[in-house]
Amino acid sequence: MIARSLASNSTKILGLILPNAEDDLFENPFFMQAMKGISIHAQNRGYYIMYAFSKNEEEELKFIKHYIRGRLVEGTILLTSRKDDKCISYLKKTQHPFVLIGRPEDPRDTLWVDNDNFQAMYNVVDYLIRKGHKDIAFIGGPANLYVTRDRLDGYRKALRTHGLPEDKGKIRCTKEFSRECGYEAMMDILNYNIPSAVATTDDLLAFGANLAIQEKKLEGIALTGFNNTYLAEYQTPSLTSVDINAEKLGMYAAKLLIDKLEKKDMPTNHYVVDTKLVERDSTL
Amino acid sequence: MIARSLASNSTKILGLILPNAEDDLFENPFFMQAMKGISIHAQNRGYYIMYAFSKNEEEELKFIKHYIRGRLVEGTILLTSRKDDKCISYLKKTQHPFVLIGRPEDPRDTLWVDNDNFQAMYNVVDYLIRKGHKDIAFIGGPANLYVTRDRLDGYRKALRTHGLPEDKGKIRCTKEFSRECGYEAMMDILNYNIPSAVATTDDLLAFGANLAIQEKKLEGIALTGFNNTYLAEYQTPSLTSVDINAEKLGMYAAKLLIDKLEKKDMPTNHYVVDTKLVERDSTL
DNA sequence: CTGAAAGCGCTTACAG
DNA sequence: CTGAAAGCGCTTACAG
């Protein structure tokens, strides 16, 4: 295999950069599911996956450089998109093939796979409004992530469409995806004013928000999450959440990258994977 | 890098076989944590990790053969130990270096890293007995896994040591590590006889058991889990659980395997990683 | 101590 | 169409 790689100048190895995401990496099945989708597609087409954990953006960049300079890896898969991402600009500069799970800064000149986060959150808020809610709060993850910004935009758009006012005091972005951050953000909002519903961008945030609501002994506040985590079903009340189809995201990411490496005709440089609102007791 | 591999006959690549573990793979942070420990140690020593998902034991074996025959991978890390494991016997037969996270059939002639599962469960049951419980049920995972057998043995030993009788009707092994299986096993036990405490070998099983207890509107049954999952803390009541230190397990696994590959003096062929009982409301 | 040469195990372009 | 030879980019043993 090694000799073949050397002779044919093709290693058939893809690099997967796991972002520094603290608890989220371990508690959010998204990463493992995406890894599964990537792995299955890659295996079918004879490719191997190498992964690297990293502590921060600098270390991610270090690994990418190391992989590319060593010519070990033919293409790279990134699992998060940040604003002004150094890894992305390096990959672009060196013309190294890569694919992004998430929305890129410039969607035309990079390969990417994503949900329609704007539409997904729009649908959530639209759904809450149709249920009669007029006073809906928003709790998002880190504000520098596109996923947060897109979902916030979807939230705003849904309010506007239905002629509802936006209240900055009811919008919070957190430092990270964790239950603690969700709890704090919810407490902030509750101390400001009690909404009738809360849309969050992550189940962990929703779990924390739920705890804050319970501590304040409030009832009947609708709550939604994202990622349809295994334990969403077992919250009290069970949590309505958006299934983002992580395995499919991974599968298409691998497909795009390998198509590119094999210089297939590329009908598209991206795929948009459908989401599904899974309705449970928290929005009844 | 590739040329170096060919010339030096050393790829510096380790293979990681992810077992077919259904939900457990996505919901139990063990796997990701172990992957992190492996990755960090390997990176420090200049090694790379390749992973493969597989649907069943046959497919795992297929990947192992493929990796070894292709000489891509210098050593292999296995994340589960089953009885009569085909992968292990193949790896032994071909003399391919590998390390097992979990207890091997013959602990002398293979490299392995594990908790002392017997002792860990002994400690749990001993702790419950000291709390005054005399009627303790057991819910374990698949009976063919060593981890289940060792923990069951620890449970039995603790009962015996304290002169308590063993009741087969209060011992259940499940098909897989899932909330559903935990729920069913607990229902079985409750329909047979109501115990005062339940020791489980996995948080997911404990989550399910908790649901069964709540549905039956029973109170004051002590409950324990394993893996100290993120959400153990947020169950009602919060769940007492054993932290198995998965990242450390992964780290030592990588260390053993790389030491072997580099033909270091091996003072030991295994490491036993300490566990820690994290006490919460479910055993108060 | 230094540097040119052989060899790792394949692929591929090319001579026959 | 077939098969011997060159070359991929390194390491390493060896000649000078």
Image: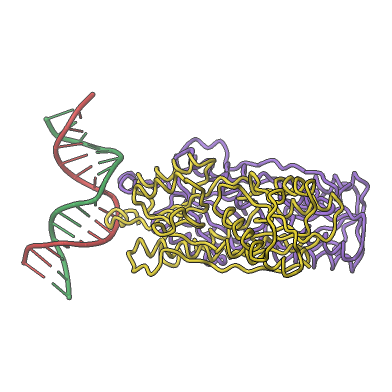
Chain colours: A purple, B yellow, C green, D red
Tell me residue A222's x, y (percent).
87, 53
Measured as percent of width and height from the top left, residue A243 is found at: 72, 45
Quadrant (top left, top right, bottom left, bottom right) of the N terminus of chain B: bottom left
Q: Residue at x 65, y 49 (%)?
A: B177
Q: Does residue B211 appear left or right of residue A31 in this picture?
A: right
Query: Which quadrant would residue B159 be assigned to in this image?
Result: bottom right
Residue A256: % across, % down: 54, 42
In the image, is B279 to the left or to the right of B94? Answer: right
Left or right relative to C9: residue B31? right
Q: Nearer the viewer, residue B199 or B68?
A: B199
Q: Is residue B71 placed above or below B44 in the rendered structure?
A: above
Report the side of A192 relative to B274 (left or right): right
Looking at the image, residue A24 lies above or below residue A191: above
Seen from the viewer's position, the closer of residues B67 and A85 is B67
> In front here: A71 or A224?
A224
Q: State which quadrant residue B30 falls in.
A: bottom right
* Residue B175 visible at all: yes
Q: Is residue A112 visible?
A: no
Task: Count numbered badges in the picture.
Answer: 0
Which quadrant would the C terminus of chain B be assigned to in this image? bottom right
For the residue pair B112 and B118, the one nearer the viewer reads as: B118
At which x and y percent is residue B238?
77, 63
Give me the residue at 63% from left, 62% from top: B121
